[in-house]
């Protein structure tokens, strides 16, 4: 099945934290994680939750207030 969040996720298959760090950092900014944005470095922090949450947000799926 192709859920909207899966379609968004498929767009980013192969993303690399070293090559595409600015994309991942923008996801963090878009998620309004101000406490995390200041220190976030995609090549030093696991960003899998940011990736999934970005896909949910783009697909208009509700995100828990304190997801991270």
Image (tube, helix red, strand yellow):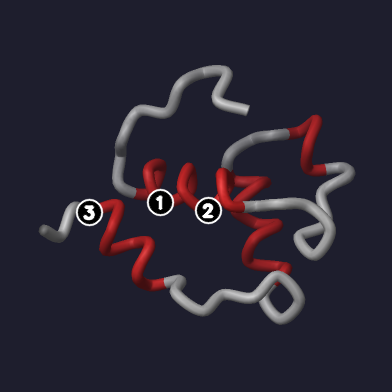
Label located before the other in sequence (3 or 1): 3
Foreground of the two, 55 or 45: 45
Which mark is on residue 4?
A: 3
Q: Tell me the residue at 48%/42% (across/down).
A: 53
Residue 38: where, in percent of width, then height? 87, 42
- Left or right relative to 39: residue 37: left
Q: Where is mark 2, residue-wise?
A: 51
Give the total number of marks visible in the rendering: 3
Residue 18: where, in percent of width, then height? 76, 76
Q: Tell me the residue at 63%/28% (across/down).
A: 68
Q: Tell me the residue at 70%/57% (across/down).
A: 25
Is mark 2 in CB contact (under 8 Å) with mark 1? yes
Which residue lies most toward the top here? 65
Q: CA distance from mark 2 to mark 1?
A: 6 Å
Residue 29: where, in percent of width, then height? 67, 46
Foreground of the two, 21 or 46: 46
What secondary structure is found at the residue carrying circle 1?
helix
Is mark 3 in CB contact (under 8 Å) with mark 2? no
Q: Where is mark 1, residue-wise?
A: 55
Badge 1: few (under 14), some or many (20 or more) residues near its Cα, within 10 Å? many
What secondary structure is found at the residue carrying circle 2?
helix
What secondary structure is found at the residue carrying circle 3?
helix
Q: CA distance from mark 3 to mark 1?
A: 8 Å
Q: Tell me the residue at 78%/52% (across/down).
A: 45
From what the image shows, is residue 39 above or below residue 26?
Answer: above
Q: CA distance from mark 3 to mark 2?
A: 14 Å
């Amino acid at each position: 099945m192709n859920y909207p969040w899966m379609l968004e996720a498929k767009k980013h298959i192969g993303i690399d934290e070293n090559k595409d760090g600015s994309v991942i950092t923008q996801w963090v900014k878009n998620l309004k994680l101000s406490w995390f944005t200041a220190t976030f470095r995609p090549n030093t922090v696991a960003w899998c939750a940011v990736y999934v949450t970005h896909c949910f947000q783009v697909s208009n799926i509700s995100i828990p207030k304190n997801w991270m």
